[in-house]
Image (cartoon, rainbow, N blue to C red):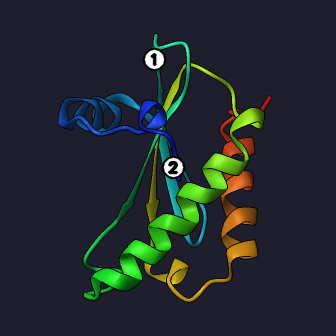
């Protein structure tokens, strides 16, 4: 689980990132990010009701993506706020495929060290 310090929770932060952040897409995931002045990076995972009506499936997917962020945190550059949104294709995907997609997107966005 991501420590509280590294979580993005405030509505104003989400609005700021969605309004002026840069976005990158894959078939399963989407990331949107913006620089911050915190001295560390913060992350949020969003899974819409459109992906699944069942909360257990949405929460399972969120836990998997958060774990990928946690394990790869030393490789991710600091001073960024990152929102990861999952699409419907992410629901049936294996953990390794999600990890591969997320690393690909972070690399494409030049957020990896």
> Who's the residue at 77% across and 36% down the image?
75
The tag earlier along the polypeptide, 1 or 2, is 2
> Who's the residue at 62% across and 83% down the image?
93
Q: Position of residue 111 (x, y in %)?
A: 68, 33
Q: Which mark is residue 59?
A: none
Picture quarter containing residue 110?
A: top right
Compared to 37, does 32 lie above or below? below
Query: Is 23 left or right of 10, judged from the image as shown?
Result: right
Tell us which disc is closer to us: 1 or 2: 1
Q: Residues within 10 Å of mark 2 (few under 14, many from 20)?
A: many
Question: Along the line of sight, which residue is nearer the eye, 18 or 68?
Answer: 68
> Who's the residue at 37% across and 77% down the image?
58
> Who's the residue at 61% across and 58% down the image?
67
Picture quarter containing residue 85?
A: bottom left
Question: Along the line of sight, which residue is nearer the eye, 62 or 50?
Answer: 62
Compared to 93, does 98 lie above or below? above
Mark count: 2
Q: Position of residue 101 (x, y in %)?
A: 69, 63
Q: Which residue is mark 2?
A: 31
Q: Residues within 10 Å of mark 1 (few under 14, many from 20)?
A: some
Q: Which residue is mark 1?
A: 36
Secondary element at tag 2 = strand
């Amino acid at each position: 689980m991501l420590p509280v310090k590294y979580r993005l929770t405030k509505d104003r932060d989400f609005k700021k990132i969605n309004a002026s952040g840069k976005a990158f897409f894959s078939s399963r995931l989407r990331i949107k990010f913006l620089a911050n002045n915190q001295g560390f990076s913060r992350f949020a995972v969003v899974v819409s009701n459109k992906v699944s009506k069942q909360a257990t499936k949405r929460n399972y997917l969120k836990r998997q993506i958060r774990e990928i962020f946690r394990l790869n945190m030393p490789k991710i550059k600091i001073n960024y706020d990152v929102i990861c949104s999952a699409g419907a294709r992410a629901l049936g995907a294996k953990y390794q495929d999600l990890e591969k997609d997320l690393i690909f997107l972070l690399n494409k966005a030049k957020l990896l060290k």
